[in-house]
Amino acid sequence: MFFKSISVIGSGSWGTALAQVFSEKFEQVFLWGRSEEVVSNINEKRENIKYLKGIKLRENIHASTDLKKVFRESDIIVVAVPTQHIRDVLKDIDFPVDKPVISASKGIEIDTLKLISDVIFETLKIDRKLIFALSGPSFAKEVALGLPTAVTLGGEISIGEKLQMALNTQSFRLYLNEDITGVQIGGAVKNVIAIATGASDGLGLGNNARAGLITRGLYEMTKVAKIFGGKPQTLYGLSGMGDLVLTATGELSRNRKFGFLIGKGLSVEKALEEVGQVVEGVKTVKALKKLMEKNDVELPISEVVYRVVYEGFSPKEAVKILMSRQPKKELL
Ligand SMILES: NC(=O)C1=CN([C@@H]2O[C@H](COP(=O)(O)OP(=O)(O)OC[C@H]3O[C@@H](n4cnc5c(N)ncnc54)[C@H](O)[C@@H]3O)[C@@H](O)[C@H]2O)C=CC1
Ligand SMILES: O=C(CO)COP(=O)(O)O
């Protein structure tokens, strides 16, 4: 398999940052976006002013609103659309796809409780060996600036090795992991925990509280991975702990910022408005609530994030609920 060109589906901050990093090695990079304005800004001004301001995009990045064309044009497809919209976007592809499709989005589909790899499988009807998930600590802005970043590529090893070679650059390092399920759970659930640490910081609860949430949050991530059939140890890697630490503490995180604003007393609506970009944890926590009910499993941090976001509980009440739980053994 030799890859000359690559297509990125989704021209938000992540899709654009990935296009920029890929444009270093690929002859041609195609980028699909819904918005005519974003697409023409990229093609004419070489900048995604709305989602990735200040980054000069390379000349070999070609943006388009024609999804089928962008899909047909290249040897690898990367999906970077907000999770709840992936099915809707991919359903328009009505021809066979026989090239690798990599999910770079993070979340769980609320209606079906499916992972993105399953949504790709169902909509495109492609061989599972061609489906991959790219996840790990990777803020779009830092990736686009060419700052060193290490991520995990989850999926089948033999094609995965070829993709790894093709996508690896001096600033973007990929590790392979066969456990595509565990890789996706890390990226999805860490967003919910980042909302919790953001709220804790917004309330001014200190460093101890944040470290406690991160550690017990990681345990929740392993519990969710087990439900989906993923390996708990995957969650100790880049796509689990790595991304959790980044998102739960990093100033650039939208999930953390959303939580922080809630902790400062803003309403959910106002906090979402203030962030102004996708906050996947708000959706993922809804899926986790369904998952808890379906599997009769406890995810205490996710549960209180759900109550704050959807049931009108205050962040202070959430802290009280967490701190007054029955004392437990430290299960890991
Ligand atoms: N921004 C980042 O640093 C990273 C983001 N991700 C993930 O990438 C995915 C995309 O996020 P971002 O690019 O950051 O979001 P963003 O908020 O920067 O951009 C949102 C994008 O989604 C598009 N969109 C909105 N509604 C849509 C719909 N109904 N159908 C199709 N497209 C729609 C918008 O046009 C825009 O291109 C998310 O799952 C996110 O968790 C993963 C790693 C890093
Ligand atoms: O997933 C990310 C970094 O790895 C981005 O996190 P946010 O969506 O919280 O900004």
Image: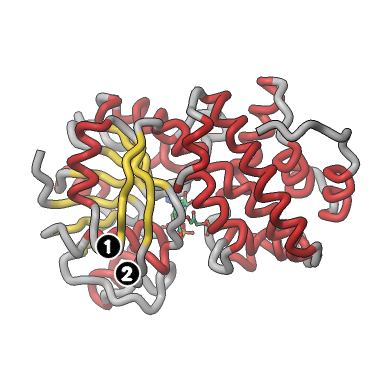
Which residue position is annotated with label 1? Answer: 21
Per the model, the C-alpha gap separating discs 2 and 1 is 7 Å
Q: Which residue occupies 77% across, 64% down?
A: 206
Numbered marks: total: 2
Q: In which image quadrant can residue 119 be found?
A: top left
Which residue position is annotated with label 2? Answer: 146
Residue 225 location, x and y as percent? Answer: 54, 30
Q: Quadrant of the N terminus?
A: top left
- Three-letter amino acid code at disc 1? Val
| In the foreground, 229 or 238 | 238
Contact between labelled residues 1 and 2, with CB atoms less than 8 Å apart = yes
Residue 27 location, x and y as percent? Answer: 11, 59
Residue 315 location, x and y as percent? Answer: 82, 54
Q: Which residue occupies 47% across, 36% down?
A: 234
Q: Is residue 77 found left or right of 138 in the rendered image?
A: left
- Three-letter amino acid code at disc 2? Gly
The circle drawn on residue 38 is none
Q: In which image quadrant can residue 91 be found?
A: top left
| In the foreground, 303 or 11 | 303
